[in-house]
Image (tube, rainbow, N blue to C red):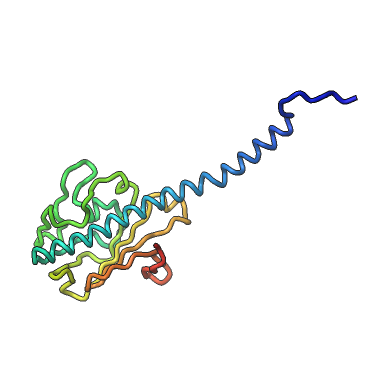
Amino acid sequence: MRGIRTGGFTMLEVLVIATIAALTASWVLPTFRRQRLQGEVDQYSRLVEVGLFNLRTRLREERLSHCICFEANNWAPPSSMGLERQQPDGSQAKPLNHCSEEDPSSRLRVMNLEGSRVSKTVQARSLESKFCISPPGTSATPQTLTLLLKSIQSDSDPNLLVRCLHMNGNGYLIRGNWNQSTQSCQPKWG
């Protein structure tokens, strides 16, 4: 005769629930981490985009020309490659050697919010070493500016995307995903 079950779980039920929970966590946690890291890159990309538009607007209002200099073709923290002037220790960076003649003033810079928490989690790369903007906010030369942004964790997670900002000489900005095989900025990011 079977006894009446009064409550509780059997060992088999507990093992099944623990297995399901472990499998779910092993799927959800990496996805959550990837979304958080990609979100940091996206947030920083938007800050750079807003900064470029604000810089262009200030130059138009003040009828000034300005050159932005970058440490080109190397992945680096934004503060050391020329995108931000504030260094991680709070000090102001000196102008890059190849751009000393422009003497970029602190009020004419790309980033409005420098040294943010997000800026410490991304790496930036510029394909050009200099991009000049002149009134009314367009480049004096047919040069373009292509900035690439990625998470500092992207080497350990190949599913993290490299974001790109591409500004042409007319000031038209494209944001998207960097396509490594075609070496171009694909405007698919919303």
| Front one among 183 and 14 | 14
Left or right of 163? Residue 106 is left
Q: Residue 124: give x, y in percent of width and height.
A: 31, 56
Q: Residue 51: give x, y in percent of width and height.
A: 23, 57
Left or right of 19? Residue 41 is left
Q: For the N terminus, which image quadrant?
A: top right
Left or right of 77? Residue 137 is left
Q: Which residue occupies the extreme right position in the image?
A: 1
Vertical arrangement, residue 183 with respect to residue 42, above or below? below
Quadrant of the image occupied by residue 21 = top right
Q: Residue 29: give x, y in percent of width and height.
A: 52, 44
Q: Residue at x 87, y 25 (%)?
A: 2
| Front one among 145 and 5 | 5
Total numbered labels:
0
Q: Residue at x 56, y 42 (%)?
A: 25
Q: Residue at x 17, y 43 (%)?
A: 91
Q: For the C terminus, which image quadrant?
A: bottom left
Quadrant of the image occupied by residue 179 = bottom left
Q: Which residue occupies the extreme bottom position in the image?
A: 142
Q: Residue at x 20, y 65 (%)?
A: 130
Vertical arrangement, residue 121 with respect to residue 60, above or below? above
Vertical arrangement, residue 116 with respect to residue 135, above or below? above
Q: Residue 176: give x, y in percent of width and height.
A: 37, 64
